[in-house]
Image (cartoon, rainbow, N blue to C red):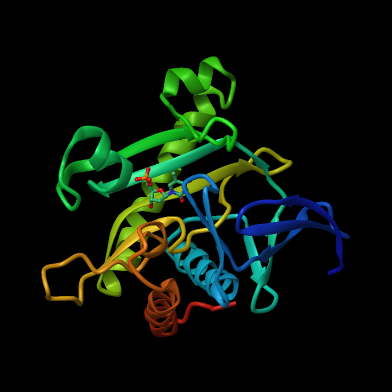
Amino acid sequence: MEKLEKLYEGKAKKLYATDDPDVLWVEYMNQATAGNGAKKAQIEGKGSLNNHITTVIFNLLKARGVKSHFIKRLSDTDQLVRTMHMYPLEIIMRNTAAGSFAKRYGVKEGTGLKRPVLEFCVKSDELGDPFINNDGIIALNLASDKELDEISRQARAVNKALSDIFSSIAVQLVDFKIEEGRTPDGEILLADEITPDTCRLWDLKDASGKIEHLDKDLFRRDLGNIIPAYEEIYDRLKTLAHAEGVATE
Ligand code: TMP
């Protein structure tokens, strides 16, 4: 597979064309950002860890019947994925109140939710990823009614499978963000990445009663170095993958 011209550069990844129009080449970068790019840093090792973590997660999800755009990991920082037409949406699932949800409704972080909450934001750096409801998505033609039903169904299926994965490694899946796209032949699929950059992950092995963050909140909130936390997540996921006979590449 040949890496051709750069198609897109985001905050954490670069996307390249390949000699196969159905396949894209993704390179994970060391850049970390928060607050819509207001805070920025280069963190050695982050790109490789996220590339490894998202690979194992996509493979563990596949073993649980959840398909994605992922094809294979090529190296420490690079992977191949299927070409997708992305919906301009950040799809957020919450199992426990935290972050902007806790702030918006004035509830304490860590408050349990009676059922998972599915939220959508429009993916737009310029607008600061504003919240949008289902009617807004359809009115603005960001997805059709039918597509939105399928995206929502998949988001709930991802939450079920991902909650199972993380509870198996003693991690609380507080909330997460995914993105979805459509293949050239119209199949709606989970895409982008699932990493500690895009999930809130709290350590259930910690008995101190304090929240032990194993995710990007360490960076967002200046709580410490993300690398040991991301390594811990990767080590536990790798152990689970080996136990289940699931590939790590
Ligand atoms: P929030 O509480 O800040 O709205 O974030 C909810 C979840 O979504 C959290 O796990 C972090 C993730 N997220 C992203 O991955 N990218 C984003 O741009 C935002 C706003 C949240």
Q: At which x and y percent is residue 24? A: 75, 57
Left/right of residue 178 with respect to residue 236 in the rendered view: right
* Of 58 and 40, the residue lying toward us: 40
Q: Residue at x 42, y 71 (%)?
A: 226
Q: Quadrant of residue 75?
A: bottom right
Q: Residue at x 46, y 67 (%)?
A: 63
Left/right of residue 6 with respect to residue 169 in the rendered view: right
Q: At which x and y percent is residue 22? A: 78, 53
Left/right of residue 240 with respect to residue 70 in the rendered view: left
Position of residue 128 relative to residue 16, above or below, is above
Q: At which x and y percent is residue 90? A: 49, 40
Left/right of residue 163 with respect to residue 66 in the rendered view: left
Q: Residue at x 45, y 55 (%)?
A: 198
* Of 141 and 90, the residue lying toward us: 90
Q: Quadrant of residue 68?
A: bottom right
* Of 214 and 190, the residue lying toward us: 214
* Of 30 and 161, the residue lying toward us: 30
